[in-house]
């Protein structure tokens, strides 16, 4: 449907960046020919490695700089090391990383407890905001939670009673 | 120093962490004055990005004051107030030389497909991000840009990702004067993509989402049409009908991995992780655009596979254009747009939250509470 009234032309800045030359190779790339030099550019200084850094097997080594946050450790770290044996094109790379992330969550709780810190899951989930902005939703969640817990506890206790009778 | 600390899906807290160190001659340490929570941070927060490690600090949209510089930093000095693009770019590799600063090959050892990004998992380089009091900024000669004295810090922080990404979405879409543009997603990026589409000469801009408050917002902020796909029987059919059964000239996917609207995509992509997120918006974009049209993708997807109608891409002769935003390339032009009043970035900020309340801020944004569009975190030193 053509917009005949052309009111849009009154929008501040309308059309100031219209560029008839904008076609699919631009602005994606201002080609310089450097691609044909492959990876032989003059590299920046190399960051000194002080912690374990895993690197994609699709490259020969580390990049000139890298993040050194949270190096791999524990069981999740072992799984991550395994994952990096596979290329970015492989499920063997990504699925173990997802598994490692989930295990890492448990490791995080254990680490907290070892340090004598009991994580406040409600605070970490930002439920104070839920209380402030979504009281009704929170009440529903609590009600459903309690209902499910009651049903599960009732079923389990019934089973336990039956089991003891046997 | 105080820093956000990821503890697992839907769990973050603020902890004391060590002050960052200069680890490379081109590093700078920046004292953060503003940082944002990005829609793509929610993908991390929801546990959807592989290799997101417990203990990491997120945050790739931030500005701050340079506190320390390495011996090779020549373009910044201590005390400069800088905006830091979310991409970490060396400026020397073949990609940076071609202004593809989002594709730097010297900033992310963990993956070759994506360059380094602040606070965005080890899949994007394992850097701690800016949702903290201080942050290490590598390649300080390349990315960080001194904030002009006439630029509001609230505008500046949105120039580190949201505005350039929305602008590049419109730019990649190859919009010609008179085009009809459909933007899927009325989050901050979709809002900005809709706004920027006018700069390229669009005659009609349509935004599709399912959150009423965001649709109302984008209608006002970006002077566009906005429709709730929940009230449309079929958004693709709607777009065909409203374009004289032709299709939109260009479609922009500003949603990415957490799209709602298709049960099968939601279950396989978001619940079971059998694909790299839900590709509903991309699916609609491909099917809504005209034959020979352009689909521009800035929504974030995971690294494995997605279910998309690739046969229709072939049959319709579509051009798909996508990339991480080259923030550094776009900054000079975007600063001009802000100065000229064409763009009003800070107009999308709905929440200003102390850094100490990051957990609540994430929950508000994630659960779409209190009509949240964009949240800015402010560390204690920037509040005094």
Image (cartoon, rainbow, N blue to C red):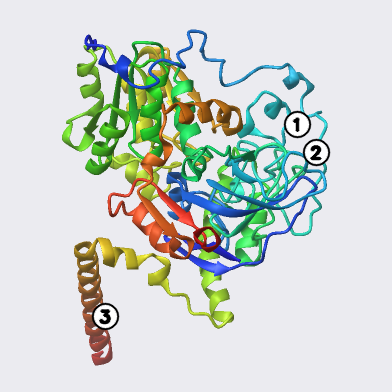
**Quarter-of-image position of residue B262:** top left
**Label 2 or label 3, whichever comes before in sequence order:** 2
For label 1, the SS is loop
Q: Is residue B332 above or below residue B209?
A: above
Q: Is there one chain holding both mark 1 and mark 2?
A: no
Say if mark 1 contacts mark 2, CB within 8 Å: yes
Q: Is there one chain holding both mark 1 and mark 3?
A: no
Q: Could you tell me how far apart the alpha carbons at marks 1 and 3 are, in whole angstroms?
A: 64 Å
Q: Could you tell me how far apart the alpha carbons at marks 2 and 3 are, in whole angstroms?
A: 63 Å
**Is residue B112 something one can see in this rendering?**
yes
Horizontal side of B269 relative to A42 (left or right) equals left
Q: Could you tell me how far apart the alpha carbons at marks 1 and 2 are, in whole angstroms?
A: 7 Å
Q: Report x, y in % for residue A165.
A: 23, 91
Q: Is there one chain holding both mark 2 and mark 3?
A: yes
**Residue matched to label 3:** A156
**Residue matched to label 1:** B92
Residue at coordinates 74% horizontally, 48% vertically from top-left? B27
Q: Nearer the viewer, residue B282 or A83?
A: B282
């Amino acid at each position: 449907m053509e917009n005949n009234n052309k009111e849009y032309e009154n929008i501040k800045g309308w059309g100031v960046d219209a560029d008839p030359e904008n076609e699919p190779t631009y602005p994606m790339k201002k080609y310089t020919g450097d691609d044909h030099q492959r990876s032989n550019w003059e590299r920046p200084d190399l960051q000194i490695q002080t912690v374990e850094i895993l690197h994609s097997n699709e490259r020969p080594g580390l990049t000139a700089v890298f993040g050194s946050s949270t190096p791999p450790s524990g069981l999740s770290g072992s799984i991550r090391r395994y994952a990096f044996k596979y290329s970015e094109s492989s499920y063997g790379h990504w699925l173990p990383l997802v598994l490692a992330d989930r295990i890492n969550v448990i490791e995080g709780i254990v680490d907290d407890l070892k340090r004598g810190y009991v994580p406040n899951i409600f605070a970490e989930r930002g439920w104070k905001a839920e209380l402030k902005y979504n009281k009704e939703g929170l009440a529903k969640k609590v009600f459903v939670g309690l209902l499910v817990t009651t049903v599960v506890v009732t079923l389990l206790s019934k089973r336990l009673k039956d089991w003891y009778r046997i | 120093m105080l820093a956000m600390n990821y503890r697992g899906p839907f769990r973050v807290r603020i902890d004391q962490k060590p002050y960052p160190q200069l680890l490379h001659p081109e590093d700078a340490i920046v004292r953060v004055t503003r940082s944002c929570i990005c829609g793509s941070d929610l993908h991390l927060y929801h546990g959807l990005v592989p290799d997101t490690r417990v203990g990491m600090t997120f945050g790739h949209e931030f500005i701050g004051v340079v506190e320390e510089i390495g011996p090779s930093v020549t373009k910044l000095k201590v005390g400069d107030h800088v905006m830091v693009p979310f991409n970490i770019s060396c400026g020397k590799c073949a990609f940076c030389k071609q202004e593809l600063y989002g594709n730097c090959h010297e900033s992310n050892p963990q993956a070759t497909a994506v360059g380094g990004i602040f606070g965005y998992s080890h899949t994007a380089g394992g850097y701690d991000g800016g949702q903290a009091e201080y942050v290490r900024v590598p390649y300080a000669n390349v990315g960080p840009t001194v904030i002009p004295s006439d630029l509001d810090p609230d505008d500046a922080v949105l120039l580190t990702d949201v505005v350039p990404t929305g602008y590049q979405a419109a730019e990649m879409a190859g919009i010609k004067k008179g085009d009809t543009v459909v933007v899927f997603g009325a989050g901050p990026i979709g809002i900005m993509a809709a706004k920027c589409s006018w700069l390229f000469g669009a005659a009609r801009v349509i935004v599709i989402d399912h959150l009423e408050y965001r649709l109302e917002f984008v209608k006002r902020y970006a002077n566009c049409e906005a429709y709730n796909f929940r009230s449309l029987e079929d958004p693709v059919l709607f777009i065909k009908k409203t374009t004289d059964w032709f299709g939109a000239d260009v479609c922009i996917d500003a949603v990415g991995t957490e799209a709602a609207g298709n049960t099968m995509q939601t279950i396989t992509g978001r619940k079971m992780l059998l694909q790299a997120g839900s590709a509903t918006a991309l699916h609609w974009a491909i099917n809504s655009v005209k034959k020979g049209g352009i689909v521009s993708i800035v929504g974030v997807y995971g690294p494995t596979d997605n279910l998309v109608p690739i046969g229709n891409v072939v049959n319709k002769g579509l051009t798909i254009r996508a990339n991480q935003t080259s923030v550094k390339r776009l900054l000079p032009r975007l600063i001009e747009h802000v100065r000229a009043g064409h763009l009003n970035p800070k107009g999308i900020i709905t929440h200003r939250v102390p850094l100490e309340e990051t957990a609540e801020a994430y929950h508000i944004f994630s659960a779409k509470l209190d009509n949240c569009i964009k949240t800015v975190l402010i560390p204690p030193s920037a509040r005094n």
